[in-house]
Image (cartoon, helix red, strand yellow):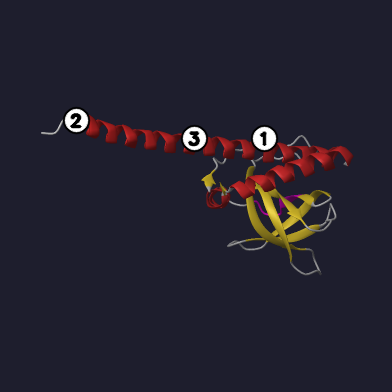
């Protein structure tokens, strides 16, 4: 696992323009529409004012739902946009910046499997964006770009970690060689 630097994502150009920085992450959550049972989802980015989720069913834009993010009280949210299995949410009560920072710190570590899922998510978003309306298409394109940026950060972190490991091994070999080169006393 590699910790990926959490960096803010620029706001979308959709009509529901965000005024807070968004951060990519991968977090299992659940949601419940009024009068229905709880369903699993994945939170793929978050800000203090809202987030984007991936679900296993179509969600109706313009409705509201309860989003449960582990360890927090359920959040009442408005579905700003929805297309296929993706939805953009706005929290009725914004999260404290400290809460968002804690979630990011706790869930920004990615594995190789996570990046494979992000690659697939990015491709799917790009495909769906081509057939979506202007607002939904812009949001899906933004999600694809966010996934790609997170993958790039992960790849860079892996590269730096591997370079550091190679440097440490090289240093150890050089230390052993310098000991072997010394004449006996």
Q: Residue at x 43, y 35 (%)?
A: 166
The part of the image, by quadrant, that contains residue 148 is top right
Circle 3 Cα neighbour tier, 10 Å, few/some/many (<14 / 14–19 / ≥20): few
Label number found at residue 10: 1
Left or right: where does residue 173 sit relative to residue 180?
right
Residue tagged 2: 182
N-term-proximal mark, 3 vs 1: 1
Q: Residue furthest front?
A: 184
Can you tell which of label 3 and label 1 is closer to the viewer? 3
Q: Nearer the viewer, residue 175 or 90?
A: 175
Q: Residue at x 80, y 37 (%)?
A: 138
* Element marked by disc 3: helix
Residue tagged 3: 160
Q: Position of residue 104 (x, y in %)?
A: 57, 48
> What separation in Å lies between label 3 and label 1 (alpha carbons)?
25 Å
Q: Residue at x 71, y 40 (%)?
A: 18
Q: Nearer the viewer, residue 111 or 4?
A: 111
């Amino acid at each position: 696992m590699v910790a990926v630097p959490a960096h803010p994502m620029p706001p979308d150009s959709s009509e529901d323009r965000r005024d807070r920085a968004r951060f990519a992450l991968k977090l299992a959550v659940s949601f419940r529409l009024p009068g229905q049972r709880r369903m699993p989802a994945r939170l793929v980015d978050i800000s203090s004012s809202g987030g984007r989720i991936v679900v296993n069913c179509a969600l109706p834009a313009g409705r509201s739902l309860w989003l449960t993010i582990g360890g927090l009280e359920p959040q009442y949210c408005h579905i700003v946009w929805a297309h296929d299995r993706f939805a953009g949410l706005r929290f009725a009560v914004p999260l404290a910046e400290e809460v968002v920072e804690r979630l990011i710190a706790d869930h920004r570590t990615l594995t190789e499997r996570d990046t494979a899922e992000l690659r697939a998510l990015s491709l799917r978003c790009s495909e769906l964006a081509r057939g979506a309306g202007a607002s939904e298409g812009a949001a899906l394109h933004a999600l694809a770009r966010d996934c790609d940026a997170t993958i790039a950060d992960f790849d860079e972190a892996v590269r730096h970690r591997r370079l550091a490991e190679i440097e440490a091994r090289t240093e150890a070999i050089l230390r052993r060689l310098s000991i072997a080169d010394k004449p006996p006393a």
